[in-house]
Image (cartoon, rainbow, N blue to C red):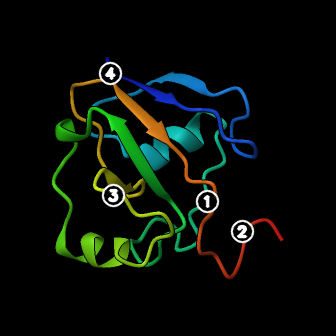
Amino acid sequence: MPQIIFLPHPQHCPDGALIEVESGQTICDAALANGIDIEHACEKSCACTTCHVIVREGFASLNEASENEDDMLDKAWGLEAESRLACQAQVGSEDLVVELPKYTINMVSEHH
């Protein structure tokens, strides 16, 4: 069973986290199921960039990004070559190291 290592983030997982996930599960669903409250303002429909993550290790094992995801990522804060939308990135068979960016472009927060 693959694992995801979430690097420390001051709001969402201050100490970082290591979780086991099923292959095929999205990074966003895995995070939420394990108490990492990653933003997902569009309810995981690939219509915003609030769940933007940077996959530091294991990027090649993820499913291929759709054209729609690539278009949305162009709007993300701090875009890097290994950026994905966590709601669309499905875990493959390899372990991942994931960084949550410091900022998101979110006009409306789910919890306010």
Q: Which image quadrant for residue 17?
A: top right
Gap between marks 3 and 2, in whole Å? 19 Å
Q: Identify the residue at image location x=37%, y=37%.
A: 56
Q: Which residue is mark 3?
A: 88
Gap between marks 3 and 4, in whole Å? 17 Å
Q: Are marks 1 and 2 in contact (CB under 8 Å)?
A: yes
- Looking at the image, residue 17 lies above or below residue 53: above
Q: Which residue is mark 1?
A: 39
Q: Which residue is mark 4?
A: 2
Gap between marks 3 and 1, in whole Å? 13 Å
Label whose residue precedes the other's in the sequence (3 or 1):
1
Which amino acid lies under the numbered mark 2 shown in the image of this protein? Glu
- Looking at the image, residue 14 lies above or below residue 2: below
Q: Which residue is mark 2?
A: 110
Q: Identify the residue at image location x=18%, y=48%.
A: 63
Tell me if 83 is positioned left or right of 58 in this view: right
Label whose residue precedes the other's in the sequence (2 or 4):
4
Which amino acid lies under the numbered mark 3 shown in the image of this protein? Gln
**Residue 43: image x %, image y %?**
53, 68
Front-most of residues 1 and 73: 73
